[in-house]
């Protein structure tokens, strides 16, 4: 994890520091090596959040866009007592989960049911093929200009788009570029769908401000559809 509790505060890992887990209260040891990003590791994570997965650079750089108080926030369901650690929870109640690896469909559904007000940001560059198939499949001309959307034809064997298209919440695909792609829909039989680009910067601003997520528009060239 990025943070542990030391003397009552959320603290970043530093060499030779000990703390406790904000979630399960068990002892944590700082891991500050040369190869992995500095983080906190459980001595025993038996009682910790089963949804938690270890993080790398991708996760960490996303979290760093947001205030410290919003990161690794424990979200609890007051009626059931169930609780989990949200990657980001903004003060407006939105949870943002960053998903680096494949996730089982059942777990994806559980998280969506649990958090309700949430969105996914999914890493599309965990392997070369996913990214290549995506950029190969995006149409040159947009499907529509307002909001801007492109057709995506999926020629890959993997179920990357298919799986994420089942989500009941917004899904943004991150290929490590300036633009994120919102997965609007995907027809798994035809392997055709639609995706909408949004500048990553605008997406982060909307998260920070708690405003409705923007979509992109291209100016209409057809005069009949122009507004006066
Ligand atoms: Zn823990």
Image (tube, rainbow, N blue to C red):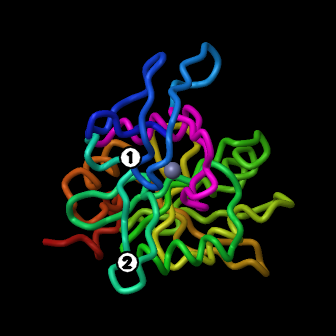
Residue at 64% across / 18% down in the picture? 35
Residue 77 shows which numbered tag?
2
Q: Is residue 184 visible?
A: yes
Viewer-proximal residue among 3 and 177:
3
Residue bearing mark 1: 199
Picture coordinates of residue 186, whole percent (x, y): 64, 74
157 on left or right of 172? right
Disc 1 crowd, CA 10 A, few/some/many (<14, 14-19, 20+): some
Whether residue 215 is situated above or below residue 99 in the rendered picture: below
177 on left or right of 207? right
- Residue 183: image quadrant is bottom right
- Residue 115: image quadrant is bottom left
Whether residue 30 is situated above or below residue 126 in the rendered picture: above
Picture coordinates of residue 106, whole percent (x, y): 67, 77
Q: Tell whether circle 2 marks a residue whose Cβ is less than 8 angstroms from ligand 1.
A: no
Query: Closer to the N terminus: mark 2 or mark 1?
Result: 2
Viewer-proximal residue among 101 and 198:
101
Measure the C-alpha gap from mark 2 to mark 1: 33 Å
Disc 2 crowd, CA 10 A, few/some/many (<14, 14-19, 20+): few
Residue segment shown in magenta: 40-66
Residue at 44% across / 58% down in the picture? 85
Picture coordinates of residue 198, whole percent (x, y): 40, 53
């Amino acid at each position: 994890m990025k943070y542990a509790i030391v003397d009552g505060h959320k603290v970043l890992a530093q060499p030779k520091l000990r703390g406790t887990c904000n979630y399960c209260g068990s002892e944590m040891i700082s891991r500050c090596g040369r190869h992995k990003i500095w983080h906190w590791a459980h001595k025993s994570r038996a009682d910790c959040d089963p949804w938690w997965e270890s993080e790398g650079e991708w996760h960490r750089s996303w979290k760093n866009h947001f205030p410290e108080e919003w990161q690794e926030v424990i979200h609890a369901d007051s009626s059931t007592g169930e609780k989990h650690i949200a990657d980001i929870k903004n003060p407006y109640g939105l949870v943002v989960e960053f998903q680096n690896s494949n996730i089982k469909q059942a777990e994806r559904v559980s998280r969506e049911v649990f958090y309700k007000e949430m969105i996914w940001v999914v890493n599309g560059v965990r392997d070369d093929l996913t990214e290549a198939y995506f950029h190969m499949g995006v149409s040159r001309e947009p499907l529509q200009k307002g909001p801007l959307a492109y057709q995506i034809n999926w020629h890959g064997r993997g179920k990357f788009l298919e799986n994420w298209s089942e989500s009941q919440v917004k899904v943004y695909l991150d290929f490590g570029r300036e633009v994120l792609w919102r997965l609007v829909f995907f027809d798994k039989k035809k392997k055709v769908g639609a995706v909408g680009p949004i500048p990553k910067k605008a997406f982060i601003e909307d998260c920070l401000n708690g405003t409705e997520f923007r979509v992109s528009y291209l100016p209409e060239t057809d005069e009949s559809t122009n507004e006066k």
